[in-house]
Image (spheres, rainbow, N blue to C red):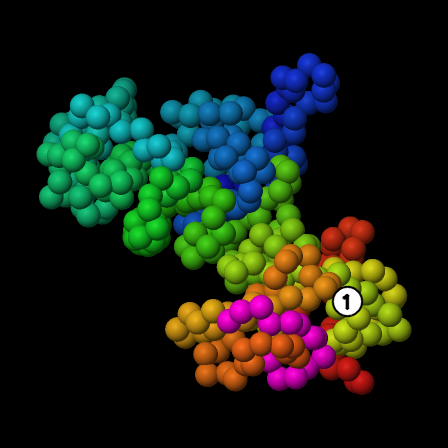
């Protein structure tokens, strides 16, 4: 089921009487979610991603704009008539019911022409439990399950209705690191097997990038960038997106363009065909080559990570106290003193200092 959002806006009245201006939670959101894809809504707390999800589900009514499921305008439809399945952060399982009864519950509430026979309800319940690999735990109660198993019950309960759209609101945030990894792999497997259009809300960029077909990066209620996760990581349109995506995060420096040369601090690093201006330069941690290049940094420490090493240095132009570069473990790096880095041009991004928008100009070796 294709989902289209047209000029979707949500405005809340400001409860602070000293501030008369209303709060714009989502501002003119336009996006089309292809049929059968898993889309990640990604951004910091308060960026509007959950509010967007609630408007798609029908739990919140848009101030302006339209929501389409396929060719159907569902903007005014109640949640129960939209054909959505929703999984919340807190699971919302009934503690006194078994796994089977929790999954069965939505089917027992169907009325009229949608009502099913007991045999059909039981068949669907068992199928949903098998899909999330809980068919051997149907008689247990939620308190007898791990956090990951409880989350899978919540997913099965959402899927048993055969929804047109599956909505997941930060479903992994209550799990520990190992369970998060396992459960996100399960979510991806289930989505691929069912082919249900799925919208996944998270503030965890690693989570979103690992399972999404496309991501939507949001800030202050507005869409900053959309695209395939790797494409957005490799080519951010502004400084916010560049800083939000990546672990370890991107290294950010003060810089300038002067007479066709890009400088980080006082170090000339690339030739660039662009007018003179103050800039901010972002360098991904994997973009450093310790070969005696022109970017000079003072070594603070070296952290061994097995396959790679993390070289922690200082540079006076850096926005952060330390510069972190990821280098292959078989690369020779001095343990102290200064190190000169060359930079991989495709891992370096230049942004205007005033607007923080990306300058899309080719970076060339000095002298070319």
Asked if 208 appears above or below 299 in the picture, the reply is above
> Visible in this render: residue 265?
yes
| 345, 298: nearer the viewer | 298
Residue at screen point 52% across, 60% down = 248
Residue 214 to residue 27: above or below: below
Q: Which residue is mark 1?
A: 265
Q: Nearer the viewer, residue 145 or 1?
A: 145
Label 1 Cα neighbours within 10 Å, binned few <14 / some 14-19 / many ≥20: some
Q: Residue most toward the front?
A: 336
Return the x and y of residue 51 as percentages of the image width and height: 53, 32
State the image coordinates of residue 360 (x, y, percent, origin top left).
74, 65
Helix, strand or loop: magenta stretch:
strand
Q: Is residue 296 magenta?
A: yes
Using the image, determine if residue 346 lies above or below residue 249.
below
Q: Is residue 228 visible?
A: no
Q: Quadrant of residue 140?
A: top left
User: Secondary structure under badge 1?
Assistant: loop
Quadrant including the C terminus:
bottom right
Q: Which residues are magenta?
A: 290-302
Which residue occupies 72% across, 79% down?
Answer: 294
Residue at 72% x, 16% y is 18
Q: Position of residue 234 (x, y in %)?
A: 59, 65
- Res 100 quadrant in image: top left
* Residue ranking furthest to the top: 17
- Residue drawn at x 55%, y 42% is 44
Q: Position of residue 362 (x, y in %)?
A: 74, 73
Looking at the image, which is closer to me, 296 or 4?
Answer: 296
């Amino acid at each position: 089921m294709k989902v289209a959002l047209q000029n979707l806006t949500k405005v809340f009245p400001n409860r602070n009487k000293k501030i008369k201006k209303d709060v714009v939670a989502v501002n003119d959101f336009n996006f089309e979610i292809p049929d059968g894809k898993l889309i990640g809504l990604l951004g910091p707390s308060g960026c509007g991603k959950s509010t967007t999800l609630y408007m798609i589900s029908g739990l919140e009514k848009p101030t302006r704009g339209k929501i389409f499921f396929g060719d159907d305008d569902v903007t005014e439809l109640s949640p129960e008539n939209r054909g959505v399945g929703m999984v919340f952060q807190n699971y919302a399982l009934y503690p006194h019911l078994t796994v089977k009864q929790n999954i069965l519950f939505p089917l027992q509430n169907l009325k009229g022409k949608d009502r099913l026979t007991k045999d059909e309800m039981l068949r669907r319940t068992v199928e949903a439990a098998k899909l999330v690999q809980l068919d051997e735990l149907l008689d247990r109660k939620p308190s007898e399950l791990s956090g990951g198993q409880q989350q899978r019950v919540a997913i099965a309960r959402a899927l048993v209705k055969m929804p047109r759209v599956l909505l997941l609101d930060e479903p992994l945030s209550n799990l520990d690191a190992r369970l998060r990894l396992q459960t996100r792999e399960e979510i991806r497997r289930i989505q691929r097997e069912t082919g249900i259009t799925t919208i996944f809300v998270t503030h965890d960029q690693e989570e979103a990038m690992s399972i999404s077909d496309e991501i939507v990066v949001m800030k202050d209620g507005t869409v900053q960038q959309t695209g395939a996760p790797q494409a957005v990581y490799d080519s951010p349109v502004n400084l916010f997106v560049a800083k939000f995506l990546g672990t370890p995060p991107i290294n950010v420096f003060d810089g300038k363009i002067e007479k066709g040369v890009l400088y980080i601090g006082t170090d000339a690093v690339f030739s660039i065909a662009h007018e003179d201006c103050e800039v901010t330069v972002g360098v991904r941690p994997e973009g450093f080559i310790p070969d005696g290049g022109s970017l000079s940094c003072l070594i603070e420490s070296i952290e061994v990570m097995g396959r790679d090493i993390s070289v922690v240095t200082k540079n006076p132009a850096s926005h952060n106290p330390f510069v972190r570069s990821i280098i292959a473990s078989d690369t020779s790096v001095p343990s102290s003193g200064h190190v000169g880095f060359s930079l991989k041009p495709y891992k370096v991004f230049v942004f205007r200092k005033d607007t923080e928008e990306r300058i899309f100009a080719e970076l060339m070796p000095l002298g070319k």
